[in-house]
Image (cartoon, rainbow, N blue to C red):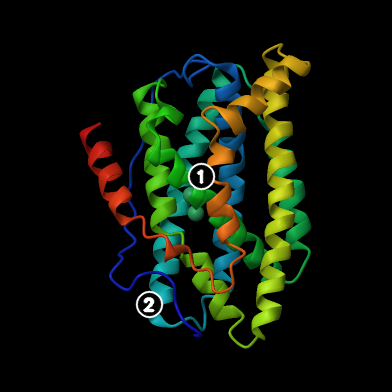
Amino acid sequence: MAREVTPSDLVITPRDRRFGRGARTERWWNGGDPVATALYNALSATFPKGEAFFVESVRQFRDDAPPKLAAEIKAFTTQEVMHSREHVAFNKRAHEAGYDLKPLEDRVDWRLNFVRSKPPIASLAATMALEHFTAILAHELLRDPRHLGSCDPESAAMWRWHAIEEIEHKGVAYDTWLHATRNWPRFKRWSVKAKVMMLVTRNFVIDRTMGSLELLRQDGLTGPRVWARLFWFAFVRPGMFRKVFAAWASFFMPGFPPWNHDARALLADAERSLAAA
Ligand SMILES: [Fe+2]
Ligand SMILES: [Fe+2]
């Protein structure tokens, strides 16, 4: 293996937690705000299929992985499978609250089937880029409590639990990518990675925007004022997507590894709060 980026003393620990079973979630569970709810529901709609795809993509390269990476892939798989399970349950509650997530899930299927029609390294590259995306969103979610400030405690705990584990395993797909491309010239590795990230970002922004607008349409909310409110929420206040921009851009630095940004202090704090909750 060329090198590894996950710190050697980091143990990826799957936390088998269940949230909100038997509970009813308010339709606008995120602070009573349809826009905040739509964006998070649009994200949640992607997770069961998306994370199954991440697992499948990484596992295609585990056979000749060194033992440390193989163990990390195993822990990553366990974490993602549990995330999918909890988002299936969360999405079911959104469905019970009156939303039809099927158009959003169909869109995810369409994107993933396109990548699956390419060689396996394309799936790994897309996973590596999307895992960076999830990790930076997760970091911002934990860093600023306002993102989930006024939502019900059970939903907040589920999103924070997921965020903790996303940060914890943020280096695994990247390490797998470094391993799988260990014989590639440096520039080729960088240029493929950069192109894939640009593509993934474009698709992510388009699809999550369309998904959020579809859910708002199901609320009977349409038109330019609603688009402006969605833009404001995503990019201005609390502005999740604006705040992750620098971390997103760091991906393009030559030699970028996700653990350049050591998030273990943030993880420890979040874990304490989750245990208290
Ligand atoms: Fe996950
Ligand atoms: Fe992940």
Q: Which residue is mark 2?
A: 68
* Mark whose residue sits in front, 1 or 2: 1
- Which of disc 2 and disc 1 is earlier in sequence? 2
**Res. 100 visible in picture:** no
- What x and y, as percent, mark residue 152? 39, 21
- Number of numbered discs overlaid on the protein picture: 2
Label 2: state its secondary structure: helix
Residue 253 makes an appearance in the image: yes
Above or below 159: residue 222: above
* Position of residue 203 measured from the top left corner of the image (x, y, whole percent): 73, 47
Q: Quadrant of residue 274?
A: top left
At a point 47% along the width and 42% down the height, the residue shown is 85
For residue 197, which quarter of the picture?
bottom right
Q: Judging from the image, what secondary structure is the residue with disc 1 in?
A: helix
Q: Is residue 31 left or right of residue 39?
A: left
Residue 220, above or below 195: above
Q: Residue at x 71, y 25 (%)?
A: 213
User: Where's residue 114, x and y in %?
Assistant: 78, 56
The amino acid beneath tag 1 is: Leu
Q: Quadrant of the C terminus?
A: top left
Q: Residue furthest top?
A: 220
- Could you tell whether 23 is left or right of 123 in the image? left
Q: Position of residue 168 (x, y in %)?
A: 38, 57
Q: Does the residue at mark 1 contact the one at mark 2 (Cβ under 8 Å)?
A: no
Determine crowd level at label 2: few under 14, some 14-19, many 20+ residues with C-alpha closer than 10 A.
few
Occupied quadrant, residue 193: bottom right
Q: What's under tag 2, amino acid-wise?
A: Lys
Above or below, 222 against 40 in this view is above
Front residue of 165 and 92: 165
Q: Which mark is residue 190?
A: none
Residue assigned mark 1 = 137
